Amino acid sequence: RPSHTLRAHPTSIVIVSVDVRVDSCHALAYGFGGTHLAREVIDREMAGITPEQAAATVARAVEAVQRTLPAESRVAGISISVPGIVDAYTGFVSYAPHLGWRDVEWGPAVLSALDTPLPVSFGNDANLGALGEHLRGAGRGVDAMLYVSGGIGIGGGYVERGRVRMGGAGFAGEIGHMPIDPAGEACPCGARGCWETRIGRDVIASRWNGDFDGVLEAAHRGDPAALAEIEVTGHWLGLGLRGLIAITDPARIVLGGHLAPLLPLVETHVYAECASLPQMRAGRIDIVAGALGEDAALIGGAEVQMIATIGSVSPI
């Protein structure tokens, strides 16, 4: 007799993935095979509020997506990404400069607000974004991938043979705080001349005296002032990538956040800045825009929690 074919129902087992951002909180109900079942966005400034208020906001977002799930769905776990250094198991946030947190016992506040028996995991947004792009996006099929996330800050994650390299203390990937311009501006981290003070989204917008989308639109129209700003940004982006390539030797670089729509405008400048590297001369590195947009950390977090909770990777 023909064998029976078993298929995972996309709504049967669900992970609720939460992404805490500086200006909002996003939640996604994520099923087998990468199915997006429900979404909630809470627009509020997360920077400057107390950890308890942030935990309550996370709980509201989780509850909102759970209410809209099909009756047959079973939530099996919750993943929470943070724009900072966070312990995956305890939720202890060592440092999140754009939230204004340092050495914060956030995990207990989150668990109290959620009041759930479900397993809850935490992760750095850039590291989870890197896994999201590696598993579901522009980094699929590549053994060594560097992900650079763009936003108010700049983060990064390096995936090699399916695993994110965390470093000795779990602080690897804070590439936005690479010193790149000794004469540069002060950074929220307390140093001066960090990479994100040159290529951060709001930094680019402030140099343009407008918003980020405005400078992109003007550059696409051929506005000379906007093109000059884009050229400067391309120089600093390429300079930072040149150093990262020399250290990590990726097969592919995936640019996320605001760097993805920026790439077509700065690609020539970036490649010119990196041209002296042997990997670039040999054509061994691709630099591409991310495929998941602002969902990269949500998807990466959901995939990690799906693996941890179910014990196997959801079908790809």
Image (spheres, helix red, strand yellow):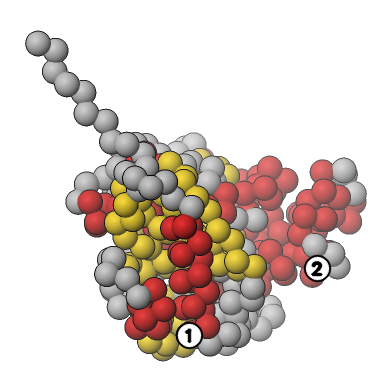
Q: What amino acid does circle 1 point to?
A: Glu
Query: What residue is rendered at 68% in x and 42% in y?
Result: 264
**In the image, residue 306 lies at what x, y percent?**
30, 52
Q: Nearer the viewer, residue 236 or 144?
A: 144
Do we see residue 291 in this rendering? yes
**In the image, residue 152 lies at what x, y percent?**
63, 69
**In the image, residue 40 lies at what x, y percent?**
55, 58
Do we see residue 255 in this rendering? no
Labels 1 & 2 near each other (Cβ < 8 A): no
Q: Reply above or below: 211 against 184.
A: above
Closer to the N terminus: mark 1 or mark 2? 1
In the picture, the quarter occupied by the C terminus is: top left
Q: CA distance from mark 1 to mark 2?
A: 35 Å
- Marks 1 and 2: which is nearer the front? 1
| Secondary structure state at the residue bearing disc 2 | helix
Crowding at dot 2, Cα within 10 Å, few <14 / some 14-19 / many 20+, comes out as: some
Q: Reply above or below: 150 against 179.
A: above
Q: Nearer the viewer, residue 107 or 88?
A: 107
Query: What residue is rendered at 72% in x and 46% in y?
Result: 265
Q: Residue 76: which quarter of the image?
A: bottom left
Query: What residue is rendered at 48% in x and 41% in y?
Result: 138
In this view, the residue farthest toward the front is 71
Which residue is label 2 attached to?
207
| Secondary structure state at the residue bearing disc 1 | helix
Q: Nearer the viewer, residue 124 or 252?
A: 124
Mark identifier at residue 92: none
300 on left or right of 217:
left
In the picture, the quarter occupied by the N terminus is: top left
281 on left or right of 300:
right
Which residue is label 1 attached to?
52
51 on left or right of 184:
left
